[in-house]
Each structure stands twice: as C-alpha cells, then as structure tokens.
Image: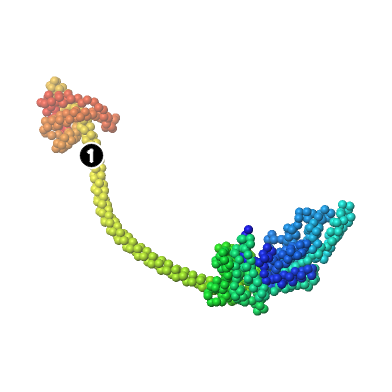
C-alpha cells in the first residue's frame, strides 16, 4: 500500500480521498439534490475552486452510499492536440462505457440489429445488460470539448442529444420490424423501448461558461440549470486545514505522517492571509500550502509516540510573527520543487525563464497563445529543441497548477499562470534568481578578469622566456655564423689550394703527356733510327762486301789503278744514291751514338770502323731486325719490310780479323762518298 498525503496539494481530490475532503459539506448536499432535480446541470466556478474535487470526493461517494442503483460515468476529454492519438469526444465516452461494461453487454443489440457503434448503441447495450435505469454522466473540465475541431464537437452534441432526448434513434427505428421475429423475447422488446433516466453534469470554468451557447442548437436548455461553486468560506477553509491532520493513521501507513494537530491560531492566520475580498479562499491554493507544510515541516518534527502540534513558530522562518512571507516561501518552494523534480536538467533554465520572465511581467499574469508560446518564445527565444519538448513542459506545469490553459473567443488556446497567489512569490523568485545570476555574472567576469590577468602574466612570462630563448638562439646563431665564416674561409683557402693543386696537376699532367708523347716519339724515333741503322749496317755490309770483292779481284788479277778507277767509277755510277745513303748513315750512326756529327766521311777511318763495330755489336745484342729496302720499278724505295733474321756477325768478325784490310776499305768508302 502506498501512503498518501493528508493534503493532496495541486491535484484534485480522488474518490478514495473522501475521508480527508473537508469544507464542502454544504455544497455536497445542495448539489447532490440539484442533480436529481434536473436532467442536465452545469457546475461552474473559478479555476482552483475545487469542481473536480466536489464531484470525485463529494458527489460520487454520496451516490455510492445512498443510491447504489444509480450508474455513473466520469468523462474527461483532455485538451485537443493535433496529430496525436487522443480519442475524439465521442470515442472517449464510448471508451468509458466499455471500461464499466461486462463482456456480454457489448453484443446485446448485435443479436438482432445491424449496429452503428454510436453513443446510444453502446449505452443501450450497457442499460440492458446491467439493468441500469438511472445513469449519470459527469463531464469534468467540460471546457476542453471546445478545443476540438468543429466536426468532432458537432458529432458529440448530436449523439448526446440522441441519448438524452430520443427513445430510439432513426438508425434503429428503421429496423424495428426485426423485433417481430419469433426468437425476440418480450423482455428484450420492453428493454429496447424503455428509456432510462439519464442525467448529465457539465463541470466548467466560470470564464468559459459562455461557450456552452454553442450546444444550444441541440441542447437549448443547457444553461437553464446551473450551480456555482464558490471559494471556501472561512469555516470551510478552517475545516479543510484542521480536520485532515487529526485523522488517525489507520491502518498504519495509510498516511505519510501520524496524526497531528494544527494550532487554531496558525490555521486562522493562514486562512486570513488567503481570503479574497469576498472572504473566500481558493481551494487549490490552500491545499498546496498545507501539502508543503506537511512535507517540509511536519515530517521533520513529528514523533510517533506523542501528538505533535504545529504552531506558527515551526513555519515562521523569518521570525517576524507573520505568515505572509512564509506562505510566499511555501509557494516559492513548491514552484522550485516542481521544476527541479519534474523537468529534465537541460531544460530547467528555460523553464524558470518561461515562468519568471514570460508568464509574469511587471507583477502581472500575461496570457500567451499556444502556437506562439511554443514555437516563438519557447523554441526560438528560450532555446528548447522543438515544440514537442515545449508542449511536454507546458503539460507538466499545467498538471502542477502552475499554469492553466483557456480558450479565448477566437478559440485560441491561451496559457497563463495558474493562480494570482503565485505572482508575488514567482516575482520574488525571479528577482532572487536575477540577483544570483548577476552575482554569478559578476563572479564570472571577475574570474574571467583574473584568468585573463593570469593568462597575460603567463603570456608575458612566455614572451620573456621566448625572448631569452631567442637571444640564446641569436647568440648561438652568431657563434655558428662565425664558425661557418671560418669554415668558409678555410674552405676558400682549401679551394684555392685545390685549384692550385689542380693547376699544378694539370701542368704536370700536360708535362707528363708531353713527356710521354716525347718519350713515345723519341722511342719511336730511336726505334726508327735503330731500324735505319740496322738497314744501314746491312747496306754497309753489302757495300763493304762489294768493295772487298772488288779489292780481291784487283789483288788477284793485279789490275792496274786505271781498272780500279774504272770499277770505282762503275760503283759510283751504279751506286751513287747508295753512297749518299751510306754517308747519311754514317752521320746518323755517329749522331745516335752521341758522336760528333760529321757532314762527310771522317778522315779517321779507324774511328768510323770502331763505331760501326760497336753499333753492330749493340744491335746484335738487342736482336735487332734486318731491314730490306724494296724498290719499285724506278729504283726508289716504296716501303720497309721488317723481318727478324739473325745478324751475320762474320762481317764484323771479318772486319775485326782484317783490321789492316779494313782501313783501305773504309778509305775507299770515304773516297767514294766524297766523290
């Protein structure tokens, strides 16, 4: 079992809370009689005066006690919301009937007729199956009907008229011949035509009473019988404050607190503070205060083993002996608790601003049209994500009686603060919140300034550090530059040295090339001279042999000087070019062997001889090649063919053995050459 409060707060009393519903005894008795005197009754009164509580905790329990044969249905439409799955007014009525119907009651007429699912059809099924001859419909917060589209309002008032004023609607009257069938019992025929006594109670706010004019086309006498519910008088208000606290907690746990007592003086001050100019007290305001006192004060001080008495000192927070500020504090706490406990954290700030800055301005309640309030103010200005969230917040505030919704003459839904008693505490709360926010802003600005100062100091220190690092880097850069300059100078010196070395190397290379070329050239020349020398030696040998031959012939034949001369002339004539070549050869031999160059045959034939022998020996030692002159048809040399052949050393040996003979030969050579 869930424990309940002794004071329900902003919510209407429920039927099971009839035992704590005090202060309306006169209204319960009078209105109960009024219902049974008229077919339709309008219960009207200001918002917060307790119309729903009177029906739930006053009339319905009394019906259950005194007229158990009366069947009743409580219908509350709820405000219309476009694109929602909420029932239409007629569908809501049929759903309520179905909740109280037994399983068999839904198929009574269906046995014999085609049915249309209308209000009359569902109620007739209920009437027959439950033998209900007296039925009362309580339409609570009936002003919500007029929030629906016109076609749905028309549907409701048409079908309600069939229920109230028609015994059998046209749809079923057209099928009356089906009742003549044999299987239709007489009892069913009687029940079908029997019209139950149906009464209707319309509970509506007094400022919306004029909207009932829209129903007069089908319900012309709807405004004929009206009962006004006024605020609680002083005695009723005192009873509503004092009596619930004294009810025993039986069984234990029925209430959140044990029974306690409220001091009479405190109750009277509370009622006096809440009375309007006519001495009336708004029920919801009184219940909110008592509910907060029970939760915030009583539970802190009450002891289970003694009867607790709540006095002014318990709730006089400021200690001024008055209760006004404390009541405002209670409302302020209630207002804050509602937002803190029922609104999502990310939307709390926007909700506070909605109530304190939008709904209350300059100490006045300001109404706002629903679409403008949700789309422009709550979404665009207050920053809520979408209209769905905005609508949910409005529903929470409305259910907590912090806001109320009404429809103006243009059928626009207007939202405003729930009660005038909330204006002052909310204005003060707004001022406190504004001062707190100002303090927070000042603190944030001071903190921001401090952070900026710290940031500036840090930036200065950072700049100084960067400057120091830059200075060090500059010095390092200068040192590195100096080193680089030194390295560059060294590099230039090394480069110059390298260039000089390169130039010297180039010179030496050129010299080496020249030297190599010269060496090769002279080597080739030496080789050529050597070959020419060898050739000359061979030629010389041939000449010497020729001379020797001629000399031998001359000696053996004892020829005369004239003959010799002739032969010599012959040699000269035939070998003139040979002798010239031989003279050149001798000069080359002398040049090649570093002997003083001569232009003619030397007078010292012995020296020439020695030179020839010496050179011949050298050529023999080096395995020189024999050179043959190949002459063409004109007798001129055309090419030189080199053929390796052993040199005939007998010539030299022969010359060596015949030194005495050699001299005349060389003299002859000389003479021939000179000629």
> Nearest the camera: 379 or 153?
153
What residue do we see at 72% from left, 71% from top?
Answer: 27
Q: Quadrant of the C terminus?
A: top left
Instruction: State the image coordinates of residue 261 (x, y, percent, origin top left).
Output: 60, 69
What residue do we see at 60% from left, 71% from top?
Answer: 262
Instruction: Please tell me whether mark 1 sits on a helix, a strand or a loop.
Output: helix
Q: Which residue in the protein does label 1 denote?
A: 519
On screen, residue 570 versus residue 304, left or right, reads: left
On screen, residue 597 versus residue 469, left or right, reads: left
Instruction: State the image coordinates of residue 154 (x, y, percent, origin top left).
Output: 77, 65
Q: Quadrant of the N terminus?
A: bottom right
What residue do we see at 49% from left, 71% from top?
Answer: 439
Q: Which quarter of the figure has residue 625?
A: top left
Residue 145 appears in view:
no
> Nearest the camera: 656 or 639?
656
Q: Which quarter of the figure has residue 255?
A: bottom right
> Nearest the camera: 667 or 375?
375
What residue do we see at 15% from left, 30% from top?
Answer: 614
Color theme of the render: rainbow
Instruction: State the image coordinates of residue 133 (x, y, percent, origin top left).
Output: 81, 62
Q: Which quarter of the figure has residue 357?
A: bottom right
Number of residue marks: 1
Residue 36 appears in view:
yes
Which residue is most to the front?
305
Task: Check disc 1: other Cα within 10 Å, few if <14, some if 14-19, many if 20+.
Answer: some
């Amino acid at each position: 079992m869930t424990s309940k409060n002794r004071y329900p707060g902003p919510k209407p009393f429920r039927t099971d809370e009839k035992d704590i519903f005090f202060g309306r005894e006169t209204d319960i008795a009078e209105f109960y009689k009024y219902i049974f005197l008229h077919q339709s009754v309008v219960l009207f009164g200001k918002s917060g005066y307790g119309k729903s509580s009177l029906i739930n905790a006053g009339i319905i329990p009394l019906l259950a006690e005194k007229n158990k044969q009366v069947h009743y249905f409580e219908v509350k439409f709820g405000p219309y919301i476009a694109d929602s799955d909420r029932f239409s007014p007629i569908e809501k009525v049929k759903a309520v009937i179905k909740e109280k119907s037994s399983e068999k009651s839904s198929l009574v007429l269906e046995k014999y007729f085609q049915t249309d699912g209308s209000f009359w059809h569902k109620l007739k099924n209920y009437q027959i199956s439950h033998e209900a001859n007296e039925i009362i419909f309580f339409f609570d917060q009936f002003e919500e009907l007029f929030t629906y589209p016109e076609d749905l309002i028309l549907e409701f008032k048409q079908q309600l008229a069939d229920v109230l004023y028609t015994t059998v609607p046209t749809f079923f009257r057209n099928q009356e011949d089906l009742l003549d069938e044999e299987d239709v019992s007489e009892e069913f025929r009687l029940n079908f035509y029997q019209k139950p006594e149906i009464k209707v109670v319309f509970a509506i706010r007094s400022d919306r009473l004029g909207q009932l004019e829209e129903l007069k086309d089908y319900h012309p006498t709807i405004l004929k019988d009206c009962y006004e519910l006024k605020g609680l008088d002083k005695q009723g208000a005192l009873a509503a404050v004092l009596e619930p606290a004294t009810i025993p907690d039986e069984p234990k746990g029925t209430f959140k607190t044990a029974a306690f007592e409220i001091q009479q003086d405190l109750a009277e001050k509370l009622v006096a503070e809440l009375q309007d100019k006519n001495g009336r007290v708004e029920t919801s305001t009184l219940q909110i205060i008592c509910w907060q006192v029970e939760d915030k004060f009583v539970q802190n001080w009450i002891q289970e083993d003694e009867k607790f008495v709540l006095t002014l000192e318990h709730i006089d927070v400021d200690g001024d002996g008055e209760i006004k500020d404390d009541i405002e504090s209670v409302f302020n706490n209630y207002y804050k608790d509602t937002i803190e406990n029922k609104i999502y954290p990310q939307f709390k700030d926007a909700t506070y601003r909605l109530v304190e800055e939008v709904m209350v301005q300059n100490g006045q309640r300001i109404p706002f049209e629903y679409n403008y309030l949700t789309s422009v103010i709550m979404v665009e200005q207050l920053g809520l994500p979408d209209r769905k969230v905005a609508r949910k917040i409005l529903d929470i505030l409305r259910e907590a009686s912090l806001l109320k919704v009404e429809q103006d003459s243009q059928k626009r839904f207007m939202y405003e603060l729930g009660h005038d008693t909330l204006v002052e505490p909310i204005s003060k709360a707004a001022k406190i919140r504004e001062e707190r926010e100002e303090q927070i802003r000042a603190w944030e600005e001071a903190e921001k300034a401090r952070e900026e100062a710290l940031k500036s100091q840090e930036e200065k220190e950072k700049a100084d550090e960067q400057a120091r690092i830059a200075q060090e880097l500059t010095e390092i850069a200068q040192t590195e530059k100096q080193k680089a300059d030194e390295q560059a100078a060294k590099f230039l010196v090394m480069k110059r040295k390298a260039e000089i070395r390169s130039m010297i190397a180039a010179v030496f290379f050129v010299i080496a090339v020249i030297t190599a070329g010269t060496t090769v050239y002279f080597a080739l020349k030496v080789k050529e001279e050597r070959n020419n020398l060898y050739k000359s030696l061979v030629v010389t040998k041939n000449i010497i042999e020729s001379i020797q031959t001629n000399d031998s012939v001359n000696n053996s034949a004892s020829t005369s000087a004239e003959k010799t001369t002739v032969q010599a002339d012959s040699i000269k004539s035939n070998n003139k070019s040979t002798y010239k070549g031989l003279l050149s050869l001798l000069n080359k031999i002398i040049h090649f062997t570093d002997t003083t160059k001569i232009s003619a045959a030397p007078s010292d034939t012995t020296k020439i001889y020695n030179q020839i022998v010496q050179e011949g020996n050298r050529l023999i030692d080096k395995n020189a090649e024999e050179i043959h002159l190949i002459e063409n048809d004109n007798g001129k040399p055309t090419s030189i063919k080199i053929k390796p052949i052993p040199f005939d050393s007998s010539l030299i040996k022969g010359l060596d053995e015949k030194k005495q003979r050699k001299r005349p030969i060389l003299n002859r050579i000389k003479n021939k050459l000179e000629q």
